Image (spheres, grey):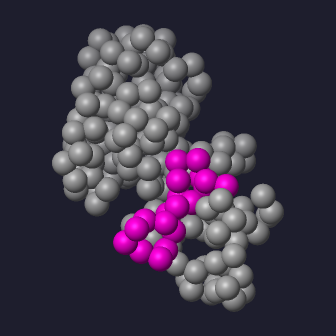
Amino acid sequence: MTERQKQILFAIIEQYAEVAVPVGSVTLAKLFDVSSATIRAEMAKLEEMGLIEQPHTSAGRIPSDAGYRLYVNSLSEDGTSSDTPKLNRSARAIEARVVGVSRADQAIRSAVDSLVELTGNLGLATIGDQLYMSGIANLFAQPEFVSNGHVQAVAGLLDNLEPWLREAAPNEPLNVFIGNENPIGKASGASLIISRFRSPYSDKSYIGVLGPTRQSYGRVMHLVQHAGAMLEEAL
């Protein structure tokens, strides 16, 4: 893959996260200051690589799960932290809800509720042997989950998430499962981003979000990781 192809892929991912409609060559041509024909040729190569795909209803392209994985791996290599003022304000909002809360369960619930507000996703965390979830309405309000098939697949994922976390116990501090990478609910079209942290309940407590594969991964990964770190420090 050339550097330009990589940058076009990343631009498609970021544009699609913002507008929720397939990204066309005209938009990208303006962004990269090249002709639409040049962009179309590069998009055709990205499609051959399996990194983007074309919905049958549109001439634009959307990222595939493989494209998202390449993007997330690049973010992980570069680090998910950012010094942007908006992101820092969001991180401080989580801290304000968690610091000073005396009960561990309340602190965890507050952190989850903050993630729901800040990301627009469903938030979740383990509290002892139970799974706390908030923001289910957010999840099913996403355009990706309008069809009954998607709703059922996501519901199945949620039903099986708690036992899977208990059995699998992901070991990385930050875990990102994209679309069909999800060990449960492979057809859900959802991404699970979770952070492991130590709590009074367990050395392997988890907090995170579940949302569509179309989301701002850099920002969400940073906030989830920050929430886990804040809880570990506070508890």
136, 21: nearer the viewer = 21
183, 123: nearer the viewer = 183
List x then y, in percent, for residue 21: 40, 71
194, 27: nearer the viewer = 27
Query: Which residue appears at 30% of the width and 23% of the height?
Result: 160
Query: Which residue appears at 34% of the width and 41% of the height?
Result: 188
Is 54 part of what is drawn in magenta?
yes
Q: Left or right: 45 with respect to 85? A: right
Residue 123 is at least partly visible in this image: yes
Query: Which residue appears at 69% of the width and 76% of the height?
Result: 41
Q: Quadrant of the N terminus?
A: bottom right
List x then y, in percent, for residue 117: 31, 51
List x then y, in percent, for residue 129: 29, 12
Q: Quadrant of residue 38?
A: bottom right
Residue 32 is at least partly visible in this image: no
Q: How many marks?
A: 0
Q: Predominant secondary structure in magenta?
A: loop
Is 80 part of what is drawn in magenta?
no
Q: Is residue 59 above or below residue 159?
A: below
40, 17: nearer the viewer = 40
Q: Is residue 140 above or below residue 152?
A: below
Q: Which segment is the magenta one? A: 49-67
Query: Which residue appears at 66% of the width and 43% of the height?
Result: 73
List x then y, in percent, for residue 195: 49, 30
Q: Is residue 109 above or below residue 22?
A: above
